[in-house]
Image (tube, helix red, strand yellow):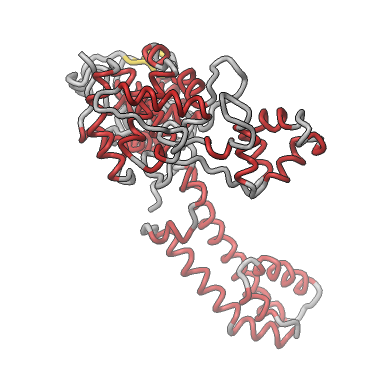
């Protein structure tokens, strides 16, 4: 009997950011098409994991490949091989290097698409821009659009679509887009590597078309993480209840056999294995010391919450399976998080440091600053108030002046100014460390 995913499972997996029309289409068609293609549970978790990776959890409003690049380096990173092939053609041979050609192709999406996709798999010269990646599995090239259209017509309830003439339909029609993903899966023979649980091979074939070349599929880590999350939502034995904390248990993390549930207070080499795996996946645990403390618990909780697990901080079989299957986390929004973001989330530490810094700036820009200006006449008030970063240079200048003058007034004024500068710098560092901790996941932003 074929695997049949349920609406709530799909919604829980994709999360609240998923666009409703695409979720509804998937919920409507998945059970029927899973039966038609005889999907097993393993096929389904790989299928939905790959789709989620391609579409950012079905949250993208436009499922059309973006060929508008603003950076030559990014063009080289994604299309290095194709740039090399283009340099061998008369049209682009005069650029000599990939770097030169990439610079030329910046902000030229149509020409870049023609470089990447023309003269391949049935796509005529100068028509690559028409057959760029579209739909949940980012189908490319004329021959693939043709084959997918023919396969959709064979599906239950399917119809004939001229996708060669109207390729944009895969990105704008949710039901057709979902049908195309199942058709693409069938055409590329992905059932075999999925049944063998080979996420990297599935990713290679789906994204690059060749599992035997040296080209790494786009967002491989993201693909591994989404598939790992799918395995949690659709476990191998969904009716199996978790053991109690003190029950005998056997699980494996990073190839090491562990004979107990791991939770706060545990100590030993098995905790080191856990901490090492969490660190390798990008979750902050503090020292790899074999002591399951508050930082390790927080890392486990963050990992669990990102993989649809109950975030209780206890590592059991389901969490262990997800740890083994997942890949290093891309920081995403954490990478660009700011002190302002943390303050909005209710961080008392950041709010306090900012208030103290403003108070110090006010003191330096007020009475003390005026006194310094009066004594020295080199306008510290304007310099200090303009930016907090200049306070550090002001502190250094203050110390230099004091060293050359025995005046009690100068010593007092500059002593206060230097103390204020040091305090400002200290609280600024606290704020920066808090932001860095949030980026690494060392705390939850409070």
Residue 241 drawn at (x, y percent):
18, 21
Q: Residue 170 or 337: which is nearer the viewer?
A: 170
* Residue at the spot 56% in from the left edge and 78% down from the top edge: 363
Q: Residue 351 or 125: which is nearer the viewer?
A: 125
* Residue at the spot 60% in from the left edge and 31% down from the top edge: 124
Q: Residue 332 or 249: which is nearer the viewer?
A: 332
Q: Is residue 20 above or below residue 32?
A: below
Looking at the image, residue 210 sits to the left or right of residue 59; the answer is: right
**Viewer can see residue 181:** yes
* Residue at the spot 44% in from the left edge and 42% down from the top edge: 441
Residue 187 drawn at (x, y percent):
42, 18
Corner quadrant of residue 432? bottom right
Corner quadrant of residue 1? top left
Q: Residue 39 or 188: which is nearer the viewer?
A: 188
* Residue at the spot 63% in from the left edge and 75% down from the top edge: 386
**Viewer can see residue 265:** no
Residue 301 drawn at (x, y percent):
34, 37
Labels in figure, total: 0
Q: Is residue 170 above or below residue 356?
A: above
Looking at the image, residue 333 sits to the left or right of residue 118; the answer is: left
Residue 118 drawn at (x, y percent):
62, 32
């Amino acid at each position: 009997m074929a695997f049949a995913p349920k609406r709530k499972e799909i919604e829980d997996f994709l999360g609240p950011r998923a666009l409703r029309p695409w979720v509804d289409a998937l919920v409507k068609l998945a059970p029927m098409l899973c039966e038609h293609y005889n999907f097993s549970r393993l096929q389904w978790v790989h299928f939905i994991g790959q789709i989620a990776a391609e579409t950012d959890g079905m949250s993208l409003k436009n499922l059309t490949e973006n060929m508008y690049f603003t950076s030559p380096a990014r063009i080289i990173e994604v299309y290095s091989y194709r740039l090399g092939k283009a340099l061998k053609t008369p049209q682009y041979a005069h650029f000599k290097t990939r770097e030169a050609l990439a610079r030329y192709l910046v902000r030229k999406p149509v020409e870049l698409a023609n470089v990447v996709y023309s003269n391949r798999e049935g796509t005529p010269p100068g028509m690559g821009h028409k057959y760029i990646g579209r739909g949940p599995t980012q189908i490319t090239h004329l021959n693939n659009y043709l084959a997918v259209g023919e396969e959709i017509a064979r599906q239950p309830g399917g119809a004939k679509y001229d996708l060669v003439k109207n390729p944009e339909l895969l990105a704008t029609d949710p039901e057709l887009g979902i049908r195309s993903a199942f058709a693409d899966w069938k055409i590329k023979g992905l059932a075999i590597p999925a049944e063998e649980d080979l996420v990297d091979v599935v990713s290679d074939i789906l994204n690059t078309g060749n599992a035997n070349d040296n080209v790494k599929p786009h967002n491989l880590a993201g693909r591994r993480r989404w598939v790992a999350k799918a395995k949690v939502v659709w476990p191998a034995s969904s009716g199996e209840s978790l053991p109690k904390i003190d029950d005998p248990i056997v699980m494996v993390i990073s190839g090491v056999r562990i004979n107990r549930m791991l939770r706060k207070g545990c100590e030993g080499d098995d905790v080191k294995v856990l901490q090492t795996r969490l660190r390798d996946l990008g979750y902050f645990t503090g020292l790899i010391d074999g002591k399951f403390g508050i930082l390790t618990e927080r890392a486990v909780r963050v990992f669990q919450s990102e993989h649809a697990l109950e975030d209780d901080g206890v590592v059991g079989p389901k969490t262990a399976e997800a740890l083994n299957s997942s890949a290093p986390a891309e920081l995403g929004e954490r990478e660009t998080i700011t002190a302002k973001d943390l303050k909005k989330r209710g961080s008392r530490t950041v709010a306090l440091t900012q208030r103290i810094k403003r108070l110090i700036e006010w003191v330096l820009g007020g009475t003390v600053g005026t006194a310094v200006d009066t004594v020295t006449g080199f306008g510290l008030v304007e310099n200090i108030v303009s930016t907090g970063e200049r306070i550090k240079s002001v502190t250094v200048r203050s110390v230099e002046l004091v060293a050359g003058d025995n005046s009690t007034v100068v010593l007092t004024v500059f002593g206060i100014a230097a103390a204020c500068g040091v305090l400002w710098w200290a609280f600024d560092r606290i704020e920066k460390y808090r932001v860095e901790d949030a980026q690494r996941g060392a705390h939850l932003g409070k």
